[in-house]
Image: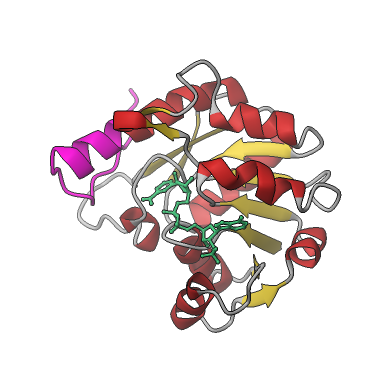
Amino acid sequence: MKIAFIGYGNVGAPLADHLQRAGHQVSLAANDPNSESVKKALARNPDLQIVEPKVAVGDAEVVFLATPFQINETALKGVADEIKGKILVDCTNPIGPKLSHGLNSVQSGSEMIQALVPDTRVVKAFSIYGFENFENSSYPGFNVKPGMMYCGDDAAAKKFVGGLIEQLGWEPLDVGGLAQALHLEHMTLLWVRMVRVSKHSPHTVWAMLTR
Ligand SMILES: NC(=O)c1ccc[n+]([C@@H]2O[C@H](COP(=O)([O-])OP(=O)(O)OC[C@H]3O[C@@H](n4cnc5c(N)ncnc54)[C@H](OP(=O)(O)O)[C@@H]3O)[C@@H](O)[C@H]2O)c1
């Protein structure tokens, strides 16, 4: 599968690395092929391809968005034609002052993105934990896998992203339509406050027990 990354920093680079090693053809949509984040991503995995954004996105079947939330609009506008019809995996989170929801909990970031690029199939995933867990999703010694909650309105896109989640070692937990993204974004804030403020271990994830 051809996968392009818009944003390949703390979150994007380890996901791109693992997906390439899992057998996908992964490109970084790079405005500046000499940027620090390109260099760091290549140091992690020299087999990642560095490609001009329009070409990377145009070629890809799936596009990951892992940029600071406030630049999403600019980044997506630059590839507005190329991204049409693609699965767009939204890893971003709108964060406001004092770790509040960046859109005042009125609309989710993912729904805002869907409105910006209406012809894409947005799936929110790989967003609810800190990057440490994207670097290493292994939780040995437990009899459940760490859960990755994800949501979206397009069933086929979600099924596909669920497969990627599983490939990267997570239990895919489909929590419903894209309207659920608001709740996932609040879960992120919960995790961030617990870990970055209250100093729980960053190697903390959720798992689902059902009976
Ligand atoms: N950090 C976490 O633990 C974490 C966890 C879950 C979700 N998130 C969310 O994931 C997103 C990324 O966070 P991060 O920590 O990975 O950020 P980061 O390390 O700062 O990386 C941001 C990436 O975005 C790229 N970028 C910046 N401006 C751009 C532009 N105008 N056009 C295209 N690309 C641009 C940067 O590339 P250049 O350096 O080349 O400009 C870099 O590759 C955020 O929305 C965040 O809320 C973060």
| As drawn, 38 above or below 120 | below
- Residue 177 appears in the figure: no
Q: Which residue is depicted at the point 55% across and 31% down? A: 109
| As drawn, 182 above or below 132 | above
**Quarter holding residue 88:** top right
Where residue 143 sits in the image (x, y, percent)? 26, 47
Q: Is residue 36 left or right of residue 208?
A: right
Q: Which residue is depicted at the point 58% across and 82% down? A: 47
Which of 148 and 75 lies nearest the eye of the viewer? 75
**Quarter holding residue 111:** top right
| As drawn, 30 above or below 57 | below
Where residue 59 sits in the image (x, y, percent)? 81, 64
Q: Which residue is depicted at the point 56% across and 58% down? A: 7
Q: Which residue is depicted at the point 34% across and 62% down? A: 136
| Residue found farthest to the left | 199
Where residue 139 sits in the image (x, y, percent)? 26, 55
The residue range painted magenta reads 190-211
